[in-house]
Image (cartoon, rainbow, N blue to C red):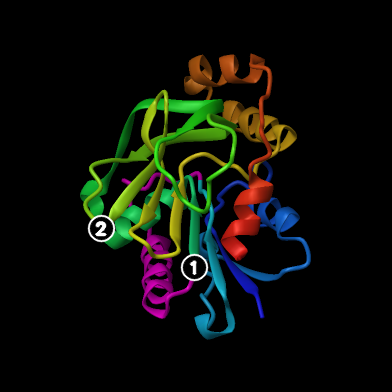
């Protein structure tokens, strides 16, 4: 029986609600979530078939106390063979946890808005999706210099590792947010602009951008859940 555990790393719920964002795509598949920044405790993973690691407004290169709880949950899921999908910060957390801190860094080219991800390798999670696939993204950190057995599956104009898989294990990371709809993306960017006006030169052009979303999340979730 399928049951998903969502590791929620959100900080500002008025602008970003990843648990609700993912649940809208899980359909009738049961799920639970734990909010780690507020001190939530990760339950026994024996009750779960899949793990989703969400984005966060935190920076992966500036450790916070809750990071280790999330990393430990990822390690436990890895040891149990539980399929894992990480998005944005969650994508970076997978690289950091399984291959070390040197695999994550500040982005040379931060990305905000709708980007085209070019698929550069074949994988069951993405095969047959539009190439490129358009989806929402918002990140100032990135994954880089991945060691084996990681495989890079996709890139964008500003990010060399937009998607990845850990060898043949059912462990995937996606730097963008395929789960975020155009409406949710706008709410996030408006909230971000209010909280970080110094980033206006990046956020305002993204807000003026015509949203472009290929709705790849439907197939990505279906394939991830098997």
What is the x, y in percent for residue 204? Answer: 59, 16
Left or right for 142, reference 225: left
Task: Give the number of callouts.
Answer: 2
Q: Which residue is nearer to you in this view: 41 or 163?
A: 163
Q: Quadrant of the N terminus?
A: bottom right
Q: What's the residue at 48%, 73% (across, down)?
A: 82
Task: Determine which residue is flagged by label 1.
Answer: 83
What is the x, y in percent for residue 189? Answer: 62, 29
Q: Secondary structure at mark 2?
A: helix
**Is residue 70 located in the magenta-colored stretch of the structure?**
yes
Q: What's the residue at 40%, 44% (across, down)?
A: 59
What is the x, y in percent for residue 43? Answer: 54, 80
Q: What's the residue at 69%, 49% (across, down)?
A: 218
Q: Quadrant of the C terminus?
A: bottom right
**Is residue 22 located in the magenta-colored stretch of the structure?**
no
Q: Residue furthest right?
A: 28
Q: Examine the rendered structure and indicate whether residue 188 appears above or below residue 50.
A: above
Numbered tag placed on residue 99 in the rendering: 2
Q: How far apart, in angstroms, are the residues tagged by discs 1 and 2?
A: 17 Å
Q: What's the residue at 52%, 49% (across, down)?
A: 55
Q: Which residues are magenta?
A: 57-82
Q: Secondary structure at mark 1?
A: loop
Q: Is residue 17 visible?
A: no
Numbered tag placed on residue 123 in the rendering: none
Which comes sooner in the sequence, label 1 or label 2?
1
Left or right for 43, reference 167: right
Left or right for 148, reference 79: left
């Amino acid at each position: 029986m399928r049951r998903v555990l969502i590791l929620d790393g959100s900080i500002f719920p008025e602008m970003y609600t990843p648990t609700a964002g993912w649940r809208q795509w899980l359909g009738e598949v049961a799920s639970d979530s734990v909010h780690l920044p507020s001190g939530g405790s990760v339950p026994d993973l024996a009750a779960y078939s899949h793990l989703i690691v969400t984005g966060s407004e935190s920076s992966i290169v500036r450790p916070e106390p809750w990071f280790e709880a999330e990393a430990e949950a990822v390690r436990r899921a890895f040891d149990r063979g539980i399929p894992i999908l990480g998005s944005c910060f969650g994508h970076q957390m997978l690289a950091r946890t399984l291959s070390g801190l040197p695999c994550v860094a500040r982005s040379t080219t931060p990305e905000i808005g709708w980007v085209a991800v070019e698929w550069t390798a074949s994988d069951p999670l993405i095969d047959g999706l539009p190439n490129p696939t358009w989806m929402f993204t918002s990140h100032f950190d990135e994954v880089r210099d991945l060691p084996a057995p990681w495989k890079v599956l996709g890139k964008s104009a500003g990010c060399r590792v937009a998607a990845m898989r850990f060898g043949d294990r059912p462990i995937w990371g996606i730097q963008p947010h395929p789960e975020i709809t155009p409406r949710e993306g706008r709410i996030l960017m408006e909230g971000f602009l209010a909280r970080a006006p110094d980033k206006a030169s990046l956020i305002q052009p993204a807000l003026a951008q015509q949203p472009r979303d290929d709705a790849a999340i439907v197939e990505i979730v279906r394939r991830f859940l098997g």
